[in-house]
Amino acid sequence: MSSSLEHDEVRLKSIWNQGAIPVILRRGGKGQRLRLRLPFSVSNRLWLQDGKSTSPKWIADGKYWEVPKAWFNDLVNRALADYGKIYVIQPYREQEKCAPACWNAQGHECQCSCMGANHGAGNYGGWFVVSDTFATRWGDQQLACRLMLRNQ
């Protein structure tokens, strides 16, 4: 594991384990529920359920709540309104853009968005070629975190 990935993992764990700001983890798999941590309150279950028929599930060994994915937007909006901020941790895949014209280039000048990383290297697979001037591929899934703040 690279130093950068280790740093990201430590940062995400630190955010997940802090108790002052709500944190919601949106996972990418089909049927996976949202995981949520809130600052402690005896009314957290009622706040989460917010009159809905489905009851939030407390996962005691992990000290977090699980709720349906469909609640995501509503939970973010209510957390912003009530707490002023929320961390959202979610999967993402970085998109790389390049082109066969770059891979097959001669010389050193590169004007491509790869910034020369693939220049003259040939096509080593994994790329979806759209045209001679554009190709794309997606990296491995990772987790990203953003702090959302209530509009003032």
Image: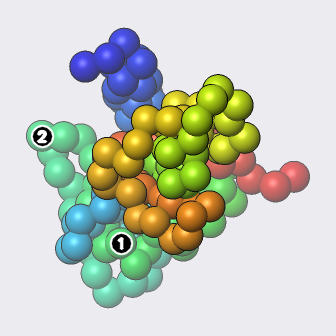
Q: Upstream in the sequence, badge 2 or badge 1?
A: 2
Question: Which residue is pictured at 22% across the width and 72% down the height?
Answer: 30
Residue type for callout 1: Lys
The answer to whether residue 109 is left or right of residue 34 is right
**Cα–Cα span, label 2 and label 1:** 21 Å
Question: Which mark is on residue 69?
Answer: 1
Q: Position of residue 84 (x, y in %)?
A: 69, 48
The answer to whether residue 69 is left or right of residue 15 is left
Q: In this rendering, does residue 98 appear at all?
A: yes
User: Quadrant location of residue 151?
Assistant: bottom right
User: Quadrant location of residue 115?
Assistant: top right
Is disc 1 placed on a helix, strand or loop? Answer: helix
Is disc 2 placed on a helix, strand or loop? Answer: loop
| Most foreground residue, 129 or 44 | 129
Q: Residues within 10 Å of mark 1 (few under 14, many from 20)?
A: some
Please count the marks in the image.
2
Which residue in the rendered view is the most extreme toward the bottom? 53
Residue type for callout 2: Asp
Position of 19 relative to 77 (above/below) = above
Question: Which residue is pictured at 32% across the width and 17% down the height?
Answer: 2
Question: Which mark is on residue 121?
Answer: none
Q: Residues within 10 Å of mark 2 (few under 14, many from 20)?
A: few
Position of 127 relative to 141 (above/below) = below
Question: Which mark is on residue 61?
Answer: 2
The answer to whether residue 63 is left or right of residue 129 is left
Label 2 close to label 1 by CB (< 8 Å): no
**Marks 2, 1: nearer the viewer:** 1
Question: Which residue is pictured at 25% across the width and 19% down the height?
Answer: 1
